[in-house]
Image (cartoon, helix red, strand yellow):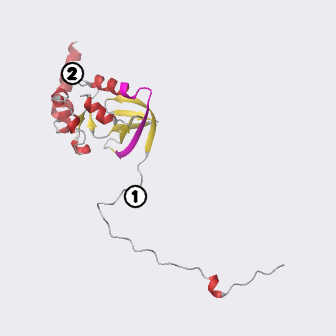
Amino acid sequence: MIPFPKKPPSENRPTYYAPPTPSPFNEKTARDAVEKPVIRGRAYVVDGDTVVIRKTQIRLFGVDAPEMNHPYGKKAKWALVKLCKGQEVKAEVTDVDAHGRTVAKCYLPDGRDLSAEMVKLGLAIDWPKFSDGVYKPLEVPDVRKKLWLADARQKGRMHIWDKYDAKQKERQENA
């Protein structure tokens, strides 16, 4: 057996360096520690502001479109279908909403933002509480009158929804 050469005692000890002193927190340069996930794939359209990509239900960031049973609801859905059809959608996850849905900024391959496109079409409105008003300049004139139920939801006037639903139910019963 061949003996290993012995090292001088100073070479046997590991060298330790003091860690660098962290710089103070700067809110302007701070970034999220974790990168937000990105989901890519074909989008199945649920309604005017909701899609499903790779089995994940995704709410479009910062906008509100009419529900399917509200005026312009079906039109909003089919406009979003037309935008997404045959294309891979990129969803950059931003949050999870109160209903457990993933919220994401969704983009077409050419870079168009689906939220912005729906607002420009007059089939969704900016929701400043969540978007900081980024889509407001894209709203078509009088769109809030046209999408009055979505506007009422944003303003917390859910009693208007209740009245609308009651009238719809009454019409169905009398038909």
Residue 33 is situated, as x and y percent measured from the top left of the image, at: 40, 58
* Residue type, label 2: Gln
Residue appearing at x 27%, y 37% in the figure:
63
Q: With respect to residue 56, does 1 lie above or below?
A: below
Taking the image as shown, residue 134 lies to the left or right of residue 104, namely left
Residue appearing at x 16%, y 29% in the figure:
141
Residue 166 is situated, as x and y percent measured from the top left of the image, at: 19, 25
- Circle 2: is it few (<14), some (14-19), or many (20+) Cα within 10 Å? few
SS for tag 2? helix
Residue 55 is situated, as x and y percent measured from the top left of the image, at: 45, 36
Name the residue furthest right: 1
Whole-angstrom CA distance, mark 2 to mark 1, is: 48 Å
Q: Which of 63 and 172 is in front in this view?
A: 63
* Residue type, label 1: Ala
Taking the image as shown, residue 5 lies to the left or right of residue 73, namely right
Which quarter shows the N terminus?
A: bottom right
- What residue is disc 1 on? 33
Q: With respect to residue 100, does 33 lie above or below?
A: below
Residue appearing at x 59%, y 79% in the figure:
14
SS for tag 1? loop
Magenta span includes 31: no
- Circle 1: is it few (<14), some (14-19), or many (20+) Cα within 10 Å? few
Which quarter shows the C terminus?
A: top left
- What residue is disc 2 on? 168
Magenta span includes 85: yes
Residue 52 is situated, as x and y percent measured from the top left of the image, at: 41, 34
Q: Give the range drawn in magenta.
A: 82-95
Q: With respect to residue 137, does 69 lie above or below?
A: above
Q: Do the residues labelled 2 and 1 touch (CB within 8 Å)?
A: no
Q: Is any atom of residue 127 visible in this view?
A: yes
Which mark is nearer the camera, 2 or 1? Answer: 1
Q: Is any atom of residue 65 visible in this view?
A: no
